[in-house]
Amino acid sequence: MVSPPPYRTHPSPLESGLRSDGKRMTPQRKKVLSLFEEVGSGIHLSAEEVHSKLTISGEKVSLATIYRTLRLLVKMTFLNELDLSEGGNRFELLSHDHPDHHHLICIRCGRTEEFENNDVVNAGKEAAKSFGFKLLESSLNVRALCPMCLNK
Amino acid sequence: MVSPPPYRTHPSPLESGLRSDGKRMTPQRKKVLSLFEEVGSGIHLSAEEVHSKLTISGEKVSLATIYRTLRLLVKMTFLNELDLSEGGNRFELLSHDHPDHHHLICIRCGRTEEFENNDVVNAGKEAAKSFGFKLLESSLNVRALCPMCLNK
DNA sequence: TTTTGATTGAAAAACACTCTCAGAGAGCCT
DNA sequence: AGGCTCTCTGAGAGTGTTTTTCAATCAAAA
């Protein structure tokens, strides 16, 4: 017994974005994006974490597909890629309300805090302007030790 | 016409830094640091590039040693490590006159320009302080397109 | 439905980097 | 100068992350 599909759903942003580019909506892509929507913006997941979270909830998506999908979602601006290094990149839901937030990273345990700062955004703008570059995005990464790791 | 070596040279900063830590001055270490001094500060080299530059000038230093030496020179604050991602980290001579400079990177051709900005440095300090972190280093990476790449 | 070609999973490869270990050699001692 | 000790090096194996390959699958258009 299969329930009929809704008579006419508005295509999701993901679906219409894919369609307009000759790409297809697949369960795997939906699952990856949904996971990020569930955990909310401001949470940074590695490809491996996405994989294990999906596996735990009984969804089988191969790691290769997760990497492919993450790349795709970054290109489609659904996700933001963070190069905080130290064992793999991380991804977060791109919240268009907070386009230019920066990261404070504990290099020991990986704890990450976000902050915003207009001076930083302006510094990036000015620098780009003075060299004749077209700015795409700027990110300040502050490498530090969190209170827990400070006490060994 | 080669001038004779001075009878008694002051130990180089590298040599005295190594000595004071029970480490040894080796030709390999000298060659790697010399390369960075030759290319000057503001030039960012990857481990692979250091390797091939040395190989081309007839110096044989293994890649493993280059990685080891780069790590050492960063720890000794002779070099600065940049996480501009896209295929490996890069290293540059740390100029102690310009301790906190930031990077404007053309994501298409890799051209990189540096700039300084006190507001950025302060933003990093404030962020660390407000979360109770101990700041180690902050770097603003501005991803952009350079004038050449803008015209395709 | 059928067709078409994008997408997937699994495994292999690519990549950047680190480690292991035996031999070489830097620096300290006569 | 010669010897000793212990760090350093080179070669190659190993590691962790990400990408690619390729046959099979499946989404979407006809």
Image: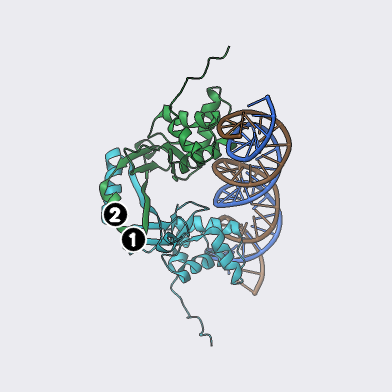
Chain colours: A green, B cyan, C blue, D brown
Q: Position of residue A84 (x, y in %)?
A: 44, 45
Q: Tell whether label 1 touches label 2 (CB within 8 Å).
A: yes
The tag on residue A123 is 2
Q: D1 and A43: which one is in front? A: A43
Label placed on residue A69: none
Q: Nearer the viewer, residue A122 or B13?
A: A122
For the view shown, which residue lies furthest in the top direction? A1
Near mark 1 (Cα within 10 A), the count class, few <14, some 14-19 or many ≥20, is some
Q: Residue at x 45, y 24 (%)?
A: A9
Q: Chain of mark 1?
A: B
Q: Quadrant of residue A91?
A: top left
Residue A108 in the figure: left or right of residue A102: right
Question: Which chain's residue wears label 2?
Answer: A
Q: Which mark is residue B115?
A: 1
Q: CA distance from mark 2 to mark 1?
A: 9 Å
Q: Residue at x 29, y 52 (%)?
A: B120
Label 2 crowd bin: few (<14), some (14–19), many (20+), radius 10 Å: many
Total numbered circles: 2
User: Does D3 sit above or below residue A28?
Assistant: below
Residue farthest bottom in this picture: B1
Q: Quadrant of residue D6?
A: bottom right
Percent of width and height locating residue B94: 40, 62
Looking at the image, can residue A109 be seen? no
The amino acid type found where label 2 is placed reads: Ala
Mark 1 secondary-structure assignment: strand
Residue A125, position in %: x, y?
A: 31, 54
In percent of the image, x 53 and y 27: which residue is there?
A54
- In this orientation, which residue lies closer to the viewer: A105 or A22? A22
Viewer-side label of 2, 1: 2
Q: Nearer the viewer, residue A125 or A24?
A: A24
In what element is the residue under mark 2? helix
Q: Position of residue B91 (x, y in %)?
A: 47, 59
